[in-house]
Amino acid sequence: MSSFETVLLIIAIVASLLVTLQLLTRLDNNKYATGLLATFMFLQALMNTMFLLVQSGIILDYWYFYRIFSPLGFLIPSLAYLYLLALLKNQTKPRVGDLVHTIPAIGMFLNYIPYFRLSADQKQQVLEAVVNNYAVYVQGQEGFLPESWVTIIRLVMPIIYIPLYYHVLRSTRTQFDPSNPFDKKLRHWAWVFTNAVVTYFGGVMLFLAVYLVPEPIATSPQFNNVMAIIFMFTFMFSAGSFLLFSLYQILSPNVGVGYILAPNPLHQGNGHSAMASSGTSVSGGKIESAVPVSGTRPSDDNELEITKDEIEQVRYVLDTGQVWKSSDVIISDIAREANLSVRKTSFIINRYLGGNVNRVINRYRIMHAKTMITSGYLDDHSMSGLYKECGYKNKVTFFNAFKRETGMTPSEFRAQKVGSH
């Protein structure tokens, strides 16, 4: 690799690790989606670091790491898919069927058992051959399967998953309101993330495919010249897209976890929280929609038929507070209480009540916390009693959510209210 390519890849790796650290501080939202994205970013950084170490020969000093992490790379395409599902369909925990996505990684771990059982000297010999000629990495045999077969599996996996990415984007389109700035940002991030990931996989696939060219062609001088050009462009595409979704997430940390706040909502002089900017308003202790509803919405292939009564059913369930006071509440709980389907409930919450179900639940919880603080709850009860009453599992999660929603900690909010009286 050239010096420029090396520097670009190092910057992308560092950016991805920063995103991982950033996401680990955001686990108070949809923990499942956030955890999937953090794992995806970390594995991207790990796989590219190993590639860089092999290309530079530095791996010879750390030979014991070689191939240990390789099976984890087979999780990356599926992690992107599961993340999109969790983010756009409000999935808050894995399903039993999701275990099927771990089969390639488990299979590759089993495949490399013969290599893992080699002596230290034998492993170093294998690694020296790879460093001297990277083609050995793709065309040799270190496990039960020839590496050419393993490479084909790596090429096929993105081909399977890429259509699934775009299917998730298309199937969730009607759940987002293009006039809602929060939905718009979240939808835009989903497309940026997907396109960047697809571009990255495209570059990696082309890079690997070149090594599968038959030897008579691969050894010709003409092909070597073409290969050098291909490598340059594929590397730019893969490393560039890798860097793109890392930097995007660093600059817009709330978007990737599905929790987007209006810019400085509390400091605009109106005293409203972020829910006021998300198409909702507060009246009489309830969150009310600012989106007009006229009888029913048209029913076609891309729309659900929604009535005023159904919207009021969902709003009533949320207004009573018994659902979101549970720390383990998910969209199906709300749907069951409202006697509606999960899809229709999700659509109503996204279209009429302010966006992603996790954001709406957080707003209800924080609004309830503000009401309790204002009424003097903390005069006779502890802070732990407050956050449990509002549906949070721990103090840190509650404090983070409260500060994001109001711009203050609960104690600061209490002091302000006491001072105003």
Image (cartoon, rainbow, N blue to C red):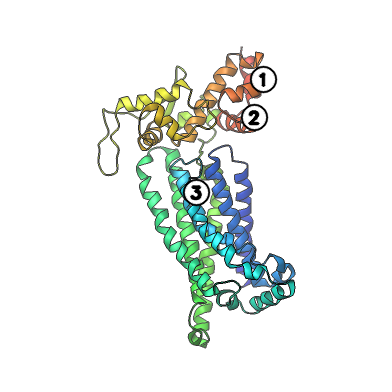
Seen from the viewer's position, the closer of residues 255 and 332 is 332
Asked which secondary structure carries label 1, the reply is loop
Kind of residue at disc 2: Lys
- Nearest to N terminus: mark 2 or mark 3: 3
Tell whether label 3 touches label 1 (CB within 8 Å): no
Q: Residue at x 59, y 63 (%)?
A: 109
The amino acid sitting under disc 1 is Ser
Q: Residue at x 48, y 54 (%)?
A: 100
In the picture of the structure, the residue carrying the numbered disc 2 is 395
**Mark 3 sits on what residue?**
83
Disc 1 crowd rating (10 Å Cα; few below 14, some 14-19, many 20+) is: few
Quadrant containing the N terminus in the rendered view: bottom right
Q: Position of residue 172 (x, y in %)?
A: 38, 45
Q: Distance between the residues labelled 2 and 3?
A: 26 Å
Q: Is residue 23 above or below residue 144?
A: above
In percent of width and height, residue 89 lies at 43, 42
Question: Label 1: which residue?
Answer: 382
